[in-house]
Amino acid sequence: MHIGAEASVSLGRYLGIPAIRKVRRPRSYRDPALDRRLTQRRMVGEARMLEKLASTSVPAPRLMAYEASTGTMVQSLMPGRQVIEVLREHDDCHDILSQIGSAIRRLHHIGAVHGDLTTNNLLWDEEPGVSMIDFGLSLVTTEVEKMGLDLQVLSECLTASHPEHSGAMEIVLEGYLSTTSEDEYEGSDTPPPKAEQVMHRFEEIRSRVRYHG
């Protein structure tokens, strides 16, 4: 299906269920020992995140199999196409963008961030709607700065890759602010910040980026 910078992804079935197999690829430019440590850390982080999300309303794949020694992970196949393609083919994507904001808020509400929120890592299907994939850089955290950065990454992606959709991030933020989640935070540290607090931090980050840019 896809050969990326960090992993190759193939499509098939696992125990009769449509699935993808994600195999981390060795990076020749890295020291082998460092590459193994990075690969294992990201795989463990992604596996733990998928396990955490399995009992929530966050639209994400389910972990089906995991083998750290070979850098292999099997996940359930999420329906739909990458949002990067959908936005480039359609003019009116208000519902999609609003659902993206809602999905992000549900993720943040449980004390987690994606870490790489681009339109390559978001899927759209008419029936279930928006879903998130590729949690290799995700973190379990309630830091408002990390959540603001999640939104900033997506904002930069929309500006750079989808300039034809003016005001796209504003629609995402509308969906983010209007979402209330029934999922309960189960961490032991400070509860996740409210949507308005994350929005405020995002605006601060966006201002810093503009200033330094």
Image (cartoon, rainbow, N blue to C red):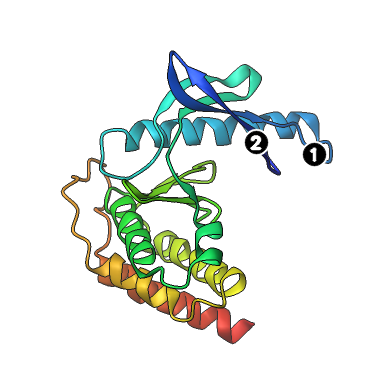
At a point 53% along the width and 54% down the height, the residue shown is 116
Q: Residue at x 30, y 65 (%)?
A: 176
> Furthest-top residue in view?
15
Tell me if residue 118 can be seen.
Answer: no
> Which of the marked residues, 1 or 2, is nearer the chain's N terminus?
1
Q: Is residue 55 above or below residue 17?
A: below
Secondary-structure class at tag 2: helix
Task: Report whether 164 appears left or right of 193.
Answer: right
Query: SS of the residue at dot 1?
Result: loop
Q: Which residue is mark 2?
A: 38
The quadrant of the rendering that contains the C terminus is bottom right
Residue 177, numbered circle: none
**Rendering coords of residue 171 (x, y %):** 36, 73
The residue depicted at 53 percent of the width and 80 percent of the height is: 208
Which residue of the protein is positioned furthest toward the bottom in this rendering?
A: 211
**Residue 145 position within the rendered picture, expressed as x and y whole percent measured from the top left:** 42, 64
Q: Is residue 87 above or below residue 29?
A: below
Q: Which residue is mark 1?
A: 30
Q: Nearer the viewer, residue 86 or 150?
A: 86
Task: Please tell me whether residue 56 is drawn above or below residue 19 in the rendered image.
Answer: below
Crowd rating for badge 1 (residues with CA inside 10 Å; few <14, some 14–19, many 20+): few
Mark 1 and mark 2 residues within 8 Å of each other at the beta carbon: yes
The residue drawn where x is 35% and y is 51% is: 126
Q: Quadrant of the N terminus?
A: top right
**Alpha-carbon neighbours of circle 2 within 10 Å: few (<14), some, or many (≥20)?**
few
Quarter of the image where one finds residue 161: bottom right
Residue 8 in sight:
yes
